Image (cartoon, coloured by chain):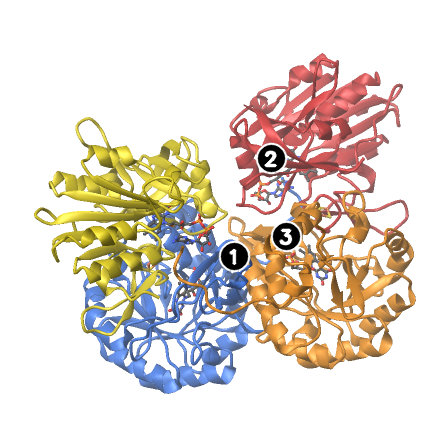
Chain colours: A blue, B orange, C red, D yellow
Amino acid sequence: MARDLSVRIGSLELPNPLIAASGCFGYGLEYDEVVDLSALGGVCVKGLFMTEREGHPPPRIVETPAGMINAIGLQGIGVHRFVREKLPLLRERGARVFVNVCGTTVDEYVEVSKVLSQAAGVSALELNISCPNIKEGGIQFGCSLMGTSAVVSAVRKATHLPIIPKLTPNVTDVASFARAAEDAGADAVSLVNTFLAMAIDVETRRPTITNVLGGLSGPAIRPIAVRMVWECAQDVKIPIIGMGGITNARDTLEFLLAGATAVQIGTANFVDPFVWSKVLAGLEDYLERHGIDRLSDLIGAFDPTPPTAVHA
Amino acid sequence: MARDLSVRIGSLELPNPLIAASGCFGYGLEYDEVVDLSALGGVCVKGLFMTEREGHPPPRIVETPAGMINAIGLQGIGVHRFVREKLPLLRERGARVFVNVCGTTVDEYVEVSKVLSQAAGVSALELNISCPNIKEGGIQFGCSLMGTSAVVSAVRKATHLPIIPKLTPNVTDVASFARAAEDAGADAVSLVNTFLAMAIDVETRRPTITNVLGGLSGPAIRPIAVRMVWECAQDVKIPIIGMGGITNARDTLEFLLAGATAVQIGTANFVDPFVWSKVLAGLEDYLERHGIDRLSDLIGAFDPTPPTAVHA
Amino acid sequence: MPPLDVDATVMANRRLSRDYNVLTLSAAEIGTRTRAGQFVMVRPTGMTETLLRRPFSVFEIVRDARGAPIAITILNKRAGRTTNRLYEAEPGDRIACLGPLGRPFTAVSAPSEAWMVAGGVGLAPFATLAEALAAAGTPTTLFYGARSGQELFHLDFFDRLGVTLVLATEDGSRGERGRVTQPLDRALASRAPGSTMIYACGPEPMLAAVAEVAGRHQQPCEVSVERTMGCGMGGCYSCVIRVRHGAEAARFVRSCISGPVFDGAEIVWD
Amino acid sequence: MPPLDVDATVMANRRLSRDYNVLTLSAAEIGTRTRAGQFVMVRPTGMTETLLRRPFSVFEIVRDARGAPIAITILNKRAGRTTNRLYEAEPGDRIACLGPLGRPFTAVSAPSEAWMVAGGVGLAPFATLAEALAAAGTPTTLFYGARSGQELFHLDFFDRLGVTLVLATEDGSRGERGRVTQPLDRALASRAPGSTMIYACGPEPMLAAVAEVAGRHQQPCEVSVERTMGCGMGGCYSCVIRVRHGAEAARFVRSCISGPVFDGAEIVWD
Ligand SMILES: Cc1cc2nc3c(=O)[nH]c(=O)nc-3n(C[C@H](O)[C@H](O)[C@H](O)COP(=O)(O)OP(=O)(O)OC[C@H]3O[C@@H](n4cnc5c(N)ncnc54)[C@H](O)[C@@H]3O)c2cc1C
Ligand SMILES: Cc1cc2nc3c(=O)[nH]c(=O)nc-3n(C[C@H](O)[C@H](O)[C@H](O)COP(=O)(O)OP(=O)(O)OC[C@H]3O[C@@H](n4cnc5c(N)ncnc54)[C@H](O)[C@@H]3O)c2cc1C
Ligand SMILES: Cc1cc2nc3c(=O)[nH]c(=O)nc-3n(C[C@H](O)[C@H](O)[C@H](O)COP(=O)(O)O)c2cc1C
Ligand SMILES: Cc1cc2nc3c(=O)[nH]c(=O)nc-3n(C[C@H](O)[C@H](O)[C@H](O)COP(=O)(O)O)c2cc1C
Ligand code: FES
Ligand code: FES
């Protein structure tokens, strides 16, 4: 029996809660041959500024226990080329396109958002105020409540599209940022972006990646990300898109139970680009085993009653 | 040829930089049969309040990818019983004893510190202002610059012993806390304590540990911890004791290169209580291979010059 | 004697059912030191899916013709990541094995009788205990309960040692249908108070029931508990259980060093 | 054709030296699709010490009597965690294998000659390329450099295909002492511009040198580069290399999808 996996983020209805995480799925078309893009809840494309960006010199990634550090530096083709070259193809394929919007100033976020609002085929704007890998913009907004409000309210005035600020985990109280975003008119929040991190090559005593610092993603961070989603879920009413180290249906459910309405998968897609259908099958199976008809019934269904110490 | 592994934390000379992390080595005596306590740089015992504490009901730990979450809740015998029952035995064994000092109020930190200052055989006080697992005290001081200053300066007035506030990683700017500690008279800082985290049993939809939230430790967090140590090392002059996911000599060197003068090992001791001699041998071997006489020459010796993208 | 960390080789893996297997590990030195009721902390070498070791009772001490230990076995039941891996282990695989750890059972001798009560994989500590009791000439009975007759293992072994067997299965496929505490309770009715040492290992609800039955019949009772353990050596405080000594207030004690064997009367069950 | 993810079984592991081995993987379908120069992203199943897959050239396509692919091999050189594991792999082990990926070499045919230049494990893509060239009847030479004669592998294979071999070793134990670019440079002196397609794979300094030599002699040149890859499919932007197309500004392109094979003249070397 088919179960209902659909979820709703404001006015957006997604067939299932799985969204490709920004920066982990190129512009989506790279995966055209192996993934039916229309079968995903959504595709969030790589962060875009107004103009092209070259990013950091390689090496840009290094593996760490159950995770990886990246400092890509937001290499990208800029919003205009995206709209011209990629968006029509994504539309053709029936993808629900989330665009990760970047800026070095509030104005740039607004400008990029305007361009995207005038283009056909964009489902939502994810405001990247949390990239740890660039000197200006990004995380500098995401680490200040005023910066967060400023970006969100400015973009709010400039677009009719759903806006989803993406929060950084590198703060003391992430829920306060979710509240600031909600108050400033966000339709949802997504979290977490990567954790600022570093790995040294002890043999050379030099960095492992050119930028020295980068962002940690992957299963290693999942327990912190789940905690943050749970904290935000208790504080805001708008939907939450959770992410950080999701590799399978179990992990997806952990985020949904903690209060996420949808999730993004990033690093795990590198390991297995066929992860999407496996997770969907796992979610179906869970609903089946537990006799639940609608996946959305599980959103926030975590019950904090302690487990027993006793193993049966 | 024997290499010099000794390091100096203020007035304290340690034969090597390896200190058993608080809460991961009981009161030290539990390991008496398998580890020569005098051969460690130091032994940091489980956090102590003025009085006994029962801690949280089990289950108290759960494993996560390359890490574990714990919410022990600072079960402990209180400072008086410690001084009476444990300290004399630790002294006999020649251990350099670091005591992890806890409090629910500034006064309690001062009281515990006073008791320990009057006892013989304590090398240093590590002020636990960063435990994520108790409702009052601990992290509430560690997450506010004023709280950090208040605890450190009050204890400073009450003791001649070296004081080492232990910083939480659950903040936006850890270096500002290191500075606050330095300004308030700390002799060193130690970091990181655990990351606030959570894991849900999706089959029962209930927590995996009774306290719901706990602290994440182990290799998973190492890249974030190394980054934080590096940030602090650039901002303060006092020595730094680094920790978070250290399992071997390579990991230890990563922290030293980033600017730590000594390190603590916690979770890895659970996996292998014989880890200490293995790490020491690994450090000797590294010095040998690199023709370096003194380990302390490597402290802060990280060179941020980018690596090449090219593999030879 | 201090525990050892042995990088043991899997010498044999005997699968008993779809869930249970017996692994023979080349950890002779640990075997030499082990007393009945003690455990080892185990981690398949190179297995990095999990970080921490897992506790297992020493099941058998395998000896050569002259009685010198040459290996130990563990009785493994699949429950999750490590136990699945141990089920699938092949001869030649390496398994890090730290032990022996913990407080053993207190063996009694005649005129006292020894009654062992095992539920499922709780059989594990009783092979070595039965040998110790047999060596001391103590009359011994094993009350052994499982889900079904197919999950009652190693009966020959106990038989050969002269242990009286009382069986119970949940599905009634062998022995009495239901809980093993039922025949235990009935049998105790005819025993003089203080005449019978009861040893129990199995799920905690069973242990609580056994402790209650023993108390009601005024028999001494030792139970071996299974709490989640992070280190097995007293380092982490993860494995606590609430215990009350005499008139003292109940408090959490570390079951890895104060146990896993406790006086059943002292445990405050959840 | 789209890449496949095959849960391949290790059919054989032939260790060639202390560092090199050839693994035969039951990934026939990938073999069918592979063109010379393409790669697979590989991860030993159940290996959780590392998270990401690692890129390997398809070395050989193993065929049955009727020429149908039945397996692929990879030529593996120990460099770290995954490559050590692949060195130690045993028949029966499972290895997830995603591919074929990337842009292949452009095969030329007579009157053009094909000169392949391999440094060390850079030999890997040239077995399949040599077969394709032999099938097209293209006169082919392999310039092959390694640390020592013991690390020159698979010479018979190329010999049988009629490939001319020019060898160089750093220690002079076989062929010319020194870099393989020396004989290459000398040999090109006698070739008409545009007459010789040069293919190179090996360490980047070697590739840069080959591209320079080729440019100087006005010969076309394709190089296969090895950048750290996170995904192999264009998803992560980790694998970039700076490339200049004609008059355009140089920019970072993803070597997994725009490469790994590039026009040597277009690469801006670090
Ligand atoms: C002193 C002692 C002796 C033991 N002796 C044996 C023995 O001889 N044979 C044997 O098969 N098992 C024994 N156990 C239980 C065994 O340790 C667990 O089954 C094992 O830790 C589960 O690990 P895992 O990686 O397979 O499961 P995980 O993947 O870690 O967890 C899977 C499930 O198992 C549960 N679990 C976690 N810890 C335990 C635990 N301590 N007991 C039961 N379930 C647990 C988890 O809650 C989870 O639901 C003993 C436990 C203790 C404390
Ligand atoms: C397109 C392509 C094809 C390749 N084909 C082959 C092949 O056929 N046979 C073969 O043996 N190797 C090949 N390589 C190199 C191989 O991918 C690396 O050796 C491997 O990724 C190292 O992984 P590891 O886990 O063993 O090392 P790690 O433990 O990850 O790292 C160990 C060391 O290897 C270095 N390293 C990391 N990535 C690479 C890399 N891409 N190349 C070289 N060194 C690296 C690290 O910097 C580190 O110093 C190829 C690489 C690419 C990009
Ligand atoms: C290589 C890489 C590139 C990324 N690029 C972006 C980006 O452009 N914009 C963004 O908001 N997040 C970016 N991220 C963060 C991811 O979208 C995601 O928040 C994070 O990786 C955590 O999820 P994961 O653990 O599933 O990967 C990137 C992550 C990785 C690993
Ligand atoms: C079970 C457990 C108990 C801990 N108890 C304490 C404690 O009492 N006081 C304290 O300051 N830190 C405590 N910590 C934190 C460790 O001292 C250390 O900061 C942290 O675990 C990171 O190091 P690691 O990754 O090497 O374990 C505890 C950690 C664990 C895992
Ligand atoms: S298991 Fe660590 S204290 Fe008992
Ligand atoms: S390896 Fe991910 S984009 Fe090339």
Q: Nearer the viewer, mark 1 or mark 3?
A: 3
Residues under numbered marks 1 and 2 in contact, where contact means CB atoms less than 8 Å apart:
no
Residue B240: x and y, percent?
68, 69
Between marks 3 and 2 in the image, the one whose residue lies nearer the viewer = 3
Please, what is the three-letter code of the amino acid marked with disc 2?
Answer: Ile
- Find numbered disc 1 in the image and state the secondary structure of the residue it sits on: helix
Q: Which mark is residue B78?
A: none
Task: Name the residue rendered at 40%, 59% in the picture.
Answer: A265
- Quarter where residue B13 is shown: bottom right
Q: CA distance from mark 1 to mark 3?
A: 33 Å
Residue D194 vs residue C224, the one in the foreground: D194
The residue carrying pointer 3 sits among few (fewer than 14), some (14 to 19) or many (20 or more) residues within 10 Å by Cα, namely some
Residue A247 sits above or below residue A104 on the image: above
- Asked if the residue under mark 2 is in contact with the one under mark 3, i.e. CB atoms within 8 Å, the reply is no
Judge depth for marks 1 and 2 and give the one in front. 2
| Residue labelled with disc 1 | A220
**Residue type highlighted by circle 1:** Ala
* Residue C95, label in figure: 2
- Beta carbon of the mark 1 residue lies under 8 A of ligand 3: no
Local SS, label 2: strand
